[in-house]
């Protein structure tokens, strides 16, 4: 398996532009997570999906951020309009969770580095 | 107070030294994760543990559930171990990770 695949790896855009980040999870994994990493705040969970359904989006900063998972092999994180404070590395991760209590190892993508000028 | 605290924040070691990074947490968890991130690189999961001890090569992770404390040990450290080591905990249903701030490790040759 090629692992969790994210695109683009780097994006530089101007304030006000729409940004779309993409993620392909590992085949067979049923949970997908979007994280953001900044120097100031470290790693933060933005949203996670279980079986393509958004379970918890309490980490999404504001209405400018939206995420979708139309099928088990694809997810997008969209920022519209983008602002300089959105500059960060955005990681996607996937895992298999059997349901009920418990946890499993996450596999992270390489990240998408976003710079908003 | 953060839910996950790591110490030290920065650590410089000489090649060959034994290294310990500590993690304390204040919430009930289903598992604790140790992650590694190289400069400019992605994040790799090193260990996930909910009790006892795990070992992989020169890396050892331990957890004490009663004391809400975990340690990551690196034996015979090497410059290629230089990275940020991040402790994270999963809640009861394991679906959300809460992260520590990370420990920046530099191993000098």
Image (spheres, rainbow, N blue to C red):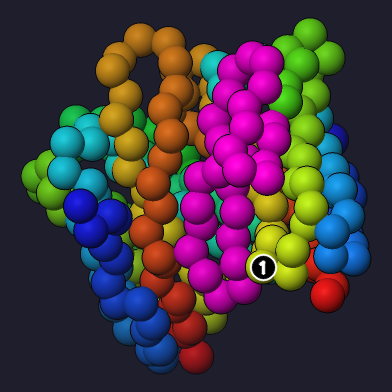
**SS majority, magenta:** strand
In which quarter of the view is residue B70 placed? top right
Whether residue B65 can be seen here: yes
Residue at 33% across, 36% down: A95
Q: Residues within 10 Å of mark 1 (few under 14, many from 20)?
A: few
Horizontal arrangement in the rendering, residue B17 relative to residue A111 (left or right): right
Residue at 17% across, 36% down: A28
Residue at 79% across, 61% down: B105
Q: Is B51 a magenta residue?
A: yes
Q: Is B73 a magenta residue?
A: no
Residue at 41% across, 66% down: A111
Above or below, B80 relative to A76: below
Q: Where is residue B38 shown, x and y percent of the image?
A: 60, 67
Q: Where is residue B1 shown, x and y percent of the image?
A: 84, 35
Q: Where is residue A103 shown, x and y percent of the image?
A: 44, 23
| SS label for mark 1 | helix
**Magenta segment boundaries in residue numbering:** B33-61
In the orientation shown, which residue stands out farthest toward the left?
A: A71
Whether residue B26 can be seen here: no
Between residues A85 and B88, which one lies in front from this camera angle?
Answer: B88
Instruction: Using the image, name the chain to which the residue with label 1 belongs.
Output: B
Which residue corresponds to mark 1? B80
Above or below, B74 relative to B67: below
């Amino acid at each position: 398996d090629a692992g969790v695949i994210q695109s683009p790896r780097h994006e530089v855009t101007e304030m006000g532009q729409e940004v779309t980040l993409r993620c392909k999870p590992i085949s067979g994994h049923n949970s997908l997570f979007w994280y953001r990493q900044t120097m100031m705040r470290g790693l933060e969970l933005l949203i996670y999906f279980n079986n393509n359904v958004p379970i918890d989006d309490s980490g999404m900063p504001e209405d400018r951020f939206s995420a979708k998972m139309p099928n088990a092999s694809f997810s997008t994180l969209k920022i519209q309009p983008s602002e300089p404070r959105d500059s960060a590395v955005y990681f996607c991760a996937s895992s298999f969770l059997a349901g009920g209590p418990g946890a499993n190892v996450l596999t992270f993508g390489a990240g998408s580095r976003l710079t908003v000028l | 107070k953060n839910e996950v605290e790591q110490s030290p924040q920065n650590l410089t070691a000489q090649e060959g030294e034994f290294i310990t990074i500590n993690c304390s947490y204040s919430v009930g968890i289903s598992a604790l994760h140790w992650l590694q991130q190289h400069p400019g690189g992605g994040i790799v999961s090193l260990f996930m543990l909910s009790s006892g001890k795990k070992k992989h090569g020169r890396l050892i992770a331990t957890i004490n559930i009663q004391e809400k404390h975990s340690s990551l040990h690196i034996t015979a450290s090497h410059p290629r171990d230089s990275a940020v080591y991040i402790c994270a905990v999963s809640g009861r249903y394991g679906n959300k990770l809460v992260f520590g701030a990370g420990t920046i490790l530099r191993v000098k040759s």
